[in-house]
Image: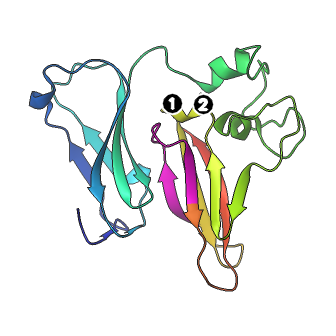
């Protein structure tokens, strides 16, 4: 627990002590490793995670979840992917389409439809909700468990110079949210990144 965290120029090097993981079983797990009253300038690209001696087949990731940093282990093999969703006739059923395409022409790319659990064959609007000043997006059931997907909310006061304010790829979080400020003009947008 810390007062605040400004990660603007400090890369985060996280080394996991694997001696405590002797009885570790493969499966998706999340651990809150830091709680604070404010996190600024957090970017998952400035994080290096190592786990020397760890025998698991999955991947480790660190994400911001409101005022916490959450370490997540995503089990290896057989997990959800954009491709498996796109090829599933009961879900995406858009095999061969690019992630940047908009199969149903509703303004949401196929990747965004996957990330938000929408139907790429039916026009879906709106992708999020605004209650008071809280902007919230619900994660898709497959995509939230896909370690390749990151949800990034960016903020601007002039529709230019967008800055990331929330980055979340924690499968334990069903939604990703941001509280708009009290300034006269405050804008937020959701960016989906597929690593």
Q: Which residue is mark 2?
A: 141
Residue 17 marker: none
Q: Nearer the viewer, residue 114 or 132?
A: 132
For residue 137, side relative to residue 39 (left or right): right
Q: Residue at x 19, y 38 (%)?
A: 16
State whether residue 165 appears in this view.
Answer: yes
Q: Residue at x 53, y 43 (%)?
A: 150
Rendered image coloring scheme: rainbow
Secondary element at image label 2: loop
Span shown in magenta: 163-177
Quarter of the image holding residue 180? bottom right
Q: Nearer the viewer, residue 7 or 189?
A: 189
Quarter of the image holding residue 10? bottom left
Q: Residue at x 36, y 56 (%)?
A: 68
Q: Nearer the viewer, residue 146 or 163?
A: 146
For the residues labelled 2 and 1, say whether their Cβ atoms are less than 8 Å apart.
yes
Looking at the image, residue 59 lies above or below residue 182: above
Residue 145 marker: 1
Q: Nearer the viewer, residue 5 or 134?
A: 134
Q: Measured from the top left, where is residue 15 in percent x and y? A: 19, 42
Q: Measured from the top left, where is residue 7 in percent x and y? A: 35, 65
Q: Measured from the top left, where is residue 161 in percent x and y? A: 63, 72
Q: How many residues crowd mark 2 within 10 Å: few (<14), some (14–19), many (20+)? A: some
Looking at the image, residue 17 lies above or below residue 14: above
Q: Please tell me whether residue 41 belongs to the stretch shown in magenta.
A: no
């Amino acid at each position: 627990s810390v007062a605040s965290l400004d990660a603007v120029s400090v890369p985060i090097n996280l080394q996991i002590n694997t001696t405590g993981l002797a009885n570790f079983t493969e499966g998706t797990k999340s651990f809150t490793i830091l709680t604070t009253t404010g996190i600024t300038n957090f970017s998952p690209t400035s994080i290096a995670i190592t786990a020397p001696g760890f025998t698991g087949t999955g991947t480790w990731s660190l994400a911001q979840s409101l005022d916490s940093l959450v370490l997540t282990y995503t089990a290896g093999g057989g997990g959800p992917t954009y491709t498996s969703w796109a090829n599933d006739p009961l879900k995406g059923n858009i095999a061969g389409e690019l992630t940047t395409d908009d199969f149903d022409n509703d303004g949401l790319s196929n990747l965004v439809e996957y990330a938000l659990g929408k139907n790429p064959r039916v026009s879906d609007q709106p992708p999020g909700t605004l209650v008071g000043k809280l902007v919230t997006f619900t994660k898709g059931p497959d995509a939230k468990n896909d370690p390749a997907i990151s949800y990034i909310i960016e903020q601007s006061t002039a529709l230019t110079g967008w800055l990331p304010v929330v980055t979340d790829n924690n499968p334990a979080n069903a939604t990703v949210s941001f509280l708009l400020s009290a300034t006269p003009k405050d804008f937020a947008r959701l960016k989906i990144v597929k690593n």
